[in-house]
């Protein structure tokens, strides 16, 4: 059993896992959250369902889903994997389910199930939970302990033997400043996992249309992704777009989020196959209007707009479709070009890349190499994953490892 006094700064996923692990090992743990509520990001994640993790359990494959930090997470995933996360929650009464795409959710489809579990586990372990407690400064004392000065008129000071920073992504300038004050440097934070703003009126008119699979490419960033695609009131979103935004986060930032985008709406069909399909329609549906006979799996609304965007009039029948028109339609189906004019963020849920440099952290204990007694976990690190539960798994893993190490 440990007699260490530990303070965890940040009441999110990583902070809770660390606090619980340390307290269950016998340490005296205090968690400080600057806002008026714990686990806000957990509450809203996955549309309020909380995508706890992903079903893949082989660490090497799991690590490939992190644009930044995958290599560093290989060893930690050996210690605490997605399988361990599932076992951890189920041991505490939370039933989880795996959906067809591998995402793992509570069977209740409610993030409150996860929030309540974490709060109950922390309270049962004896973690002292404090809300509305922002930390103004942190210094390492000559005896190796840490002194924290709290915000507010009281100017309260707290002393601890071990300190964990789990303050979340560095999109807010203050999030990483405690780490900087204790000797660390930050990779500049930029958004990851965002949708693309596209001004094309005909596309925006299709808001709500989705495809199970499309191929999206950004030539200037040399990125290409395939996956579900969603048309929104602002442009394009869905896993295919989010993956590109994650892997190309820094390049797209450098382009000020203004760049050409190409969409292949039929990635499983090559141009020759599409031309043969057109020929068959001339024979079997020659009298019908082209706009009224969509190719599977395109929706009728999307097909109509693509036909019109190819320069084919509404009155054109299959029997009268000229070769040049057919070629223009093939180009539209396999490579519609848009100009992205900006990004669209879910201001509460989005992920940032950037944070504490990974070379400054010992991942065996999530311990600072520069400041003995200091540990770092979660999104404060320069780690970010694609959508699908990977960011939460990084939080659970790094938090658990940090918590156990602090209590030793």
Image (cartoon, helix red, strand yellow):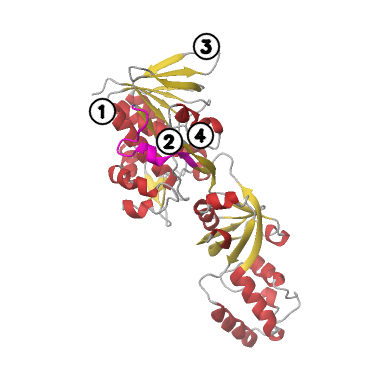
> Do tag 4 and tag 3 residues touch (Cβ < 8 Å)?
no
Q: Secondary structure at mark 4?
A: helix
Disc 2/disc 3 C-alpha distance (Å): 28 Å
To which quarter of the image does residue 171 belong? top right
Disc 4/disc 1 C-alpha distance (Å): 29 Å
Residue 318 visible (yes or no): no
Q: Is residue 315 left or right of residue 221?
A: right
Say which residue label 2 marks: 13
Name the disc covering residue 40, or none: 4
Say which residue label 3 marks: 154
Residue 362 at x, y percent in the picture? 33, 37
> Which comes sooner in the sequence, label 1 or label 2?
2
Residue at 71 percent across and 78 percent down: it is 289
Q: Secondary structure at mark 1?
A: loop
Which span is picked out in magenta?
Answer: 354-372
> Do tag 2 and tag 4 residues touch (Cβ < 8 Å)?
no
Observer-nearest of 205 and 98: 205
Name the disc covering residue 206, or none: none
Name the disc covering residue 408, or none: 1
Residue 157 at x, y percent in the picture? 45, 14
> Which comes sooner in the sequence, label 2 or label 3?
2
Residue 69 at x, y percent in the picture? 41, 46
**For residue 46, above or below residue 237:** above
**For residue 100, above or below residue 294:** above
- Label 2 environment density (alpha carbons within 10 Å; few <14, some 14–19, many ≥20): many
Residue 276 visible (yes or no): yes
């Amino acid at each position: 059993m440990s007699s260490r006094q530990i303070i965890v700064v940040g009441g999110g996923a990583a902070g809770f896992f660390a606090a619980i692990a340390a307290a269950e090992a016998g340490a005296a743990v205090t968690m400080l959250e600057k806002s008026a509520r714990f686990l806000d990001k957990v509450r809203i994640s996955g549309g309020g369902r909380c995508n706890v993790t992903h079903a893949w359990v082989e660490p090497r494959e799991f690590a490939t889903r992190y644009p930044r930090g995958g290599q560093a997470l290989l060893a930690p995933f050996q210690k605490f994997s997605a399988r361990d996360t599932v076992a951890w929650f189920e041991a505490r009464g939370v039933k989880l389910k795996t959906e067809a795409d591998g995402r793992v959710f509570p069977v209740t489809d409610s993030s409150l199930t996860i929030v309540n579990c974490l709060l109950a586990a922390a309270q049962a372990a004896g973690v002292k939970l404090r809300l509305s407690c922002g930390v103004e400064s942190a210094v390492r004392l000559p005896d190796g302990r840490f002194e924290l000065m709290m915000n507010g008129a009281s100017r309260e000071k707290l002393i601890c033997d071990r300190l964990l920073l789990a303050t979340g992504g560095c999109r807010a300038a203050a999030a990483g400043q405690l780490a900087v004050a204790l000797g660390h440097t930050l990779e500049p934070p930029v958004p990851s996992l965002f949708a693309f703003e596209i001004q094309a009126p005909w596309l925006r008119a299709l808001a709500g249309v989705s495809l199970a699979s499309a191929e999206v490419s950004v030539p200037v960033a040399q990125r290409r992704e395939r996956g579900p695609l969603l048309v929104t009131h602002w442009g394009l979103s869905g896993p295919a777009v989010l993956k590109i935004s994650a892997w190309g986060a820094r390049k797209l930032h450098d382009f000020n989020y203004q760049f050409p985008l190409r969409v292949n709406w039929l990635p499983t069909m090559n141009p020759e196959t599409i031309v043969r399909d057109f020929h068959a329609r001339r024979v079997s549906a020659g009298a019908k209007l082209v706009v009224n006979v969509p190719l599977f799996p395109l929706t009728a609304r999307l097909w109509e707009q693509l036909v019109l965007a190819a320069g084919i009039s509404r009155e054109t029948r299959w029997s009268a479709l000229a070769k040049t028109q057919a070629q223009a339609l093939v180009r539209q189906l396999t490579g519609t070009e848009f100009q992205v004019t900006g990004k669209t963020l879910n201001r509460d849920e989005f992920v940032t890349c950037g944070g504490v440099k990974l070379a400054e952290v010992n991942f065996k204990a999530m311990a600072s190499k520069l400041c003995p007694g200091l540990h770092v976990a979660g999104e404060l690190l320069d780690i970010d994953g694609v959508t699908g539960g990977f960011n939460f798994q990084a939080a659970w893993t790094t938090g658990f490892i940090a918590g156990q190490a602090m209590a030793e």
